[in-house]
Image (cartoon, grey):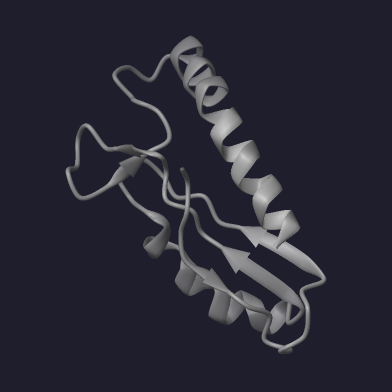
Amino acid sequence: MIDGPRREPQTGNDPDRLVVLLHGYGADGNDLIGLAEPWGRLLPGAAFVSPHAPDPCAANASGRQWFALTRLQPDELERGARRAAPALDAFLDGEKRR
C-alpha cells in the first residue's frame, strides 16, 4: 500500500485541485512535500501529497523505489513504470475520493 505526507490547501477550504509529487529513485515522499509551502502560495486551493514508493530501494536502504534500476535501458524503464502503475493508480483513486 502506498502512502505519504500530505498538506491541505492554504485557503483552509476544500481543495480545488490535487498536486502529486513523485520522488526519484532512493528518496521518499518526505523529500518533496516541503514544496507544498512555496507552491501552495501559487496554488492556494491545492492539496499536496507526496507518496512513498512501494518498495525499499535496492541501492539505498533508507530510500524507496517505484521499480528497480539495474540498467538505464528504455525497455527496462518502461517495464518498471508499467509494473508500478497499478499501485500508483489505486493510490490516486483513493486521493481523489479523499
| Quarter occupied by residue 48 | bottom right
Give the total of numbered labels.
0
Identify which residue is drawn at 43% across, 35% down: 66
Q: Please, which residue is most extreme toward the right here?
A: 16
Q: Residue at x 48, y 68 (%)?
A: 33
Up/down of 89 relative to 27, above or below: above
Position in image of residue 32 (x %, y %): 45, 63
Q: Is residue 3 shown left or right of residue 70?
A: right
Examine the rendered structure and indicate whether residue 71 appears above or below residue 85: above
Which residue occupies 55% across, 35% down?
87
Q: Name the quarter where the C terminus is drawn.
A: bottom right
In the foreground, 40 or 91: 91
Residue at point 58%, 39% (across, down): 88
Find residue 8 and report its image quarter.
bottom right
Drawn side of residue 57 relative to residue 91, left or right: left
Q: Residue at the top extreme?
A: 75
Which percent across, then down, holds residue 50?
Answer: 51, 59
Q: Position of residue 29 (x, y in %)?
A: 42, 57
Question: Where is residue 26 drawn, in percent x and y?
Answer: 30, 44
